[in-house]
Amino acid sequence: MTEVMQWPRHKPFLSATHVNKGPSTAIPSLHRVLHTPSMRTAMNCIRNRYFPVTTNRSTALHTLGHLTSVSGIQTTTYQGFSQPAPAALMVTVCVAQLYSTANRTWKNRHKKRVYRKKQQQSQAVRFVTMENSCFSYSVIFIITLLVLTTMALEECLLEQLRLKAQVRHLEHQTKLQQIKIENLLQEKELQFMDRGDEMVVINLGEKRTYADCGEIYNDGNKRSGFYKIQPRMSNTSFSVFCDMSEGGGWTVVQRRSDGSQDFYRNWTDYKQGFGDFTTAMGEYWLGNDKLHYLTLQDDYTLRIDLLDFEGQRRYADYKSFRVNDEESAYQISCGDYSGTAGDSLTGGFNPEVQWWANHNGMKFSTWDRDNDNYEENCAVDDKGGWWYNRCHSTNLNGLYYKGPYTSNTDDGIVWYTWHGWWYSMKYVAMKIRSANFEPNLV
Ligand SMILES: [Ca+2]
């Protein structure tokens, strides 16, 4: 009996489950339907022969047409079939259905892959977008930062300019105030000189001994005038003019103001001191012994005030001023210069002239005691008592001329670095104050 193949019509070739699970599950299902060995052989043959790489339905249908035309295969391969051509057609349809299903599954998978790829691309795009956003935000942030920094710098520059302008304004104000102070001081000096005849002896009694005018000032006595002082090494007290201006506490050791006193004197006069110790502008020399006792007790600063006949004032300061004792012929020593009149006392204005113009380290000379470096007697030539060298660049105890003068020698009241040798000062005061002096302003 020839076996006739009956197709199980109550079942579809492929269930939805098989379709969902793809070709790998669909193929065994087909095998269950076509379970005979001969059918399996025939199917394998057809699949290997005609569908090695078939991927779509149109190719399968094309193959179907081809198969129906090759009945030779059907008669040789499917010998058990009574109607070989329809059997081959059924197998072909079955296979075509199988590959169509597989193709759909593949397409679904392909769609999924495409979808996933799109999703990945979309994610990539999102990532790129995010990256771009981050970059944009960074650029905006940097630009904002730069703008803010620039603004801050501009503000700084403006502030700097404003402060500079303020400083210039303050400097200008300070200069104006300094000029005002100088004018006031000059007025005060002129007023002071106008009352030159006034008696200004101030008696503080015997309750306390003062070593110098600084102590008197800091004891509450702020008025300039003659006071009694007694340096610590001195056996006696004496009267001296205390200049309480320019910070106060200045002990005046020499003064020239009007030429009323004779300064061409001997050694003893200069040793003991001479002149007017009562009137406000009295001329005097305090005395070399007193100078020695005063400068022995502390580190003193010497200030020399100068006034010319044009009303101009200048000064010269010397640190560490000291006068030795009589055995050393009242040898002078002084330190660094500062001031506006130039350094005439130590010849610092020209190193080449120091060998003869420097008074620092010189002994005191008078017409009757020659201690200078000159072959003759400078005190005689220049009509004063002084720390002559060979002979001088300042001669503050010289003759009182009224400004420019002519003479055989430079014997006027000379301060070379201001007016040269041929000009005599209107007013001179040599005054000293302790370098440690601190004014008590109460
Ligand atoms: Ca000499």
Image: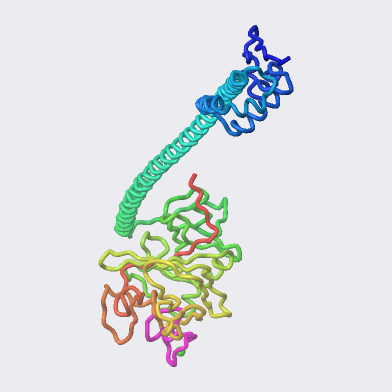
388 in the magenta segment: yes
Observer-nearest of 393 and 278:
393
* Residue 263 as seen in the image, left or right of residue 32: left
Q: Please tell me which residue is depicted at 42% across the width and 51% down the height of the picture.
A: 223
Q: Please tell me which residue is depicted at 50% across the width and 26% down the height of the picture.
A: 58
Q: Total number of numbered labels?
A: 0
Horizontal and vertical percent position of residue 412: 33, 78
The quarter of the picture where the N terminus appears is: top right
Observer-nearest of 263 and 118:
118
**Picture quadrant where residue 147 is located:** top left
Chain part drawn in magenta: 367-391
Q: Please tell me which residue is depicted at 33% across the width and 70% down the height of the picture.
A: 260
Position above or below: 150 against 384: above
Horizontal and vertical percent position of residue 14: 63, 15
Position above or below: 74 against 221: above
Horizontal and vertical percent position of residue 20: 62, 18
Position above or below: 192 against 72: below
Q: How is the image coloured?
A: rainbow
Most extreme residue toward the bottom is 375
Residue 111 appearing in the image: no
Q: Please tell me which residue is depicted at 56% across the width and 75% down the height of the picture.
A: 324
* Residue 332 as seen in the image, left or right of residue 13: left
Horizontal and vertical percent position of residue 272: 50, 72
Position above or below: 271 against 231: below
Q: Predominant secondary structure in magenta? A: loop
